[in-house]
């Protein structure tokens, strides 16, 4: 990665300079039309911004008490690496897939955040840990008799968005975007350029340039 010395620098740069719409625009331009998760997946708090690498987790439904409650959940948490994003999906979302203890565990391992295609619980106790979690909302229902983890660090698909281990995940108030590993240099480079361009266009429009003239001049809207 030439734009930054290492992943940590890259994540900081992205959080400082980028936002999900501009990244989505570049992915569209590259013909990658299905890279943003459904809008129901939202940050728990408006200020939350997340950049890291996907550690996908597969959930399935179970019904009643299990011989091994939670399946591979503890193993999945204990192998998290610094900068990983726990991305969980699967099953009918009959309970919370994330909460206070999971947050503490992932945070202690220096994971970058969690993206849950489902619900979280323990809301005040997650928020007080000041660590970014994106989910479909709050639901108190416990997971142990309703779901389990059956695989992790493997490819998953969330409503048409394919997520491979190590893909870049970026998330903010407008949602969650997945940047395929093989495209990241191009996508980040071009997103940084477009973000700069958008600042210029806005200034010109505020100074009186028409929308048509601005689009003709910069090709940015
Ligand atoms: O059991 C769950 O679904 C998660 C939970 O409560 C926690 O992490 O504290
Ligand atoms: Mg709990």
Image (cartoon, rainbow, N blue to C red):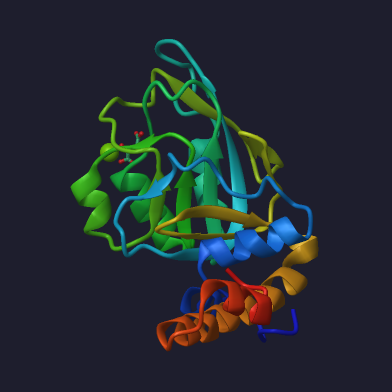
Residue at x 50% of width, y 26% of height: 148
Q: Which image quarter holds the C terminus?
A: bottom right
Residue 181, image x, y percentages: 74, 61
Residue at x 29% of width, y 25% of height: 141
Q: Quadrant of residue 4?
A: bottom right
Q: Is residue 36 left or right of residue 207?
A: right
Residue 136, image x, y percentages: 39, 38
Residue at x 56% of width, y 28% of height: 90
Q: Looking at the image, can residue 198 be seen? A: yes
Residue at the limit of the structure toward the left, as seen here: 124
Ligand 1 sits in quadrant: top left
Q: Is residue 41 above or below residue 110?
A: above
Q: Which image quarter holds the N terminus?
A: bottom right
- Nearest the viewer among 218 and 190 is 218
Q: Looking at the image, can residue 180 be seen? A: no
Residue at x 75% of width, y 84% of height: 2
């Amino acid at each position: 990665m030439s734009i930054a010395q290492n992943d940590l620098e890259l994540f900081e740069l992205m959080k400082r300079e980028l936002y999900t719409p501009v990244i989505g625009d570049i992915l569209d331009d590259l013909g990658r039309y299905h890279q943003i998760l459904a809008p129901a997946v939202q940050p728990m708090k408006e200020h939350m911004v997340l950049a890291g690498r996907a550690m996908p987790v597969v959930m399935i439904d179970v019904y009643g008490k299990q011989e091994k409650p939670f399946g591979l959940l503890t193993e999945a948490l204990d192998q998290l690496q610094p900068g990983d994003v726990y991305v969980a999906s699967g099953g009918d979302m009959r309970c919370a897939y994330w909460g206070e203890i999971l947050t503490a565990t992932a945070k202690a391992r220096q994971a970058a955040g969690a993206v849950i295609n489902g619900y979280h619980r323990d809301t005040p106790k997650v928020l007080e840990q000041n660590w970014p979690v994106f989910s479909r909302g709050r639901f108190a229902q416990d997971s142990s008799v309703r779901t389990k983890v059956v695989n992790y660090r493997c490819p998953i698909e969330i409503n048409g968005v394919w997520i491979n281990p190590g893909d870049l995940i970026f998330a903010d108030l407008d949602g969650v975007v997945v940047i395929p590993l093989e495209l990241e240099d191009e996508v980040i480079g071009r997103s940084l350029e477009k973000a700069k361009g958008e600042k210029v266009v806005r200034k010109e429009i505020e100074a009186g340039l028409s929308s048509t003239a601005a689009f003709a001049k910069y090709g940015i809207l």
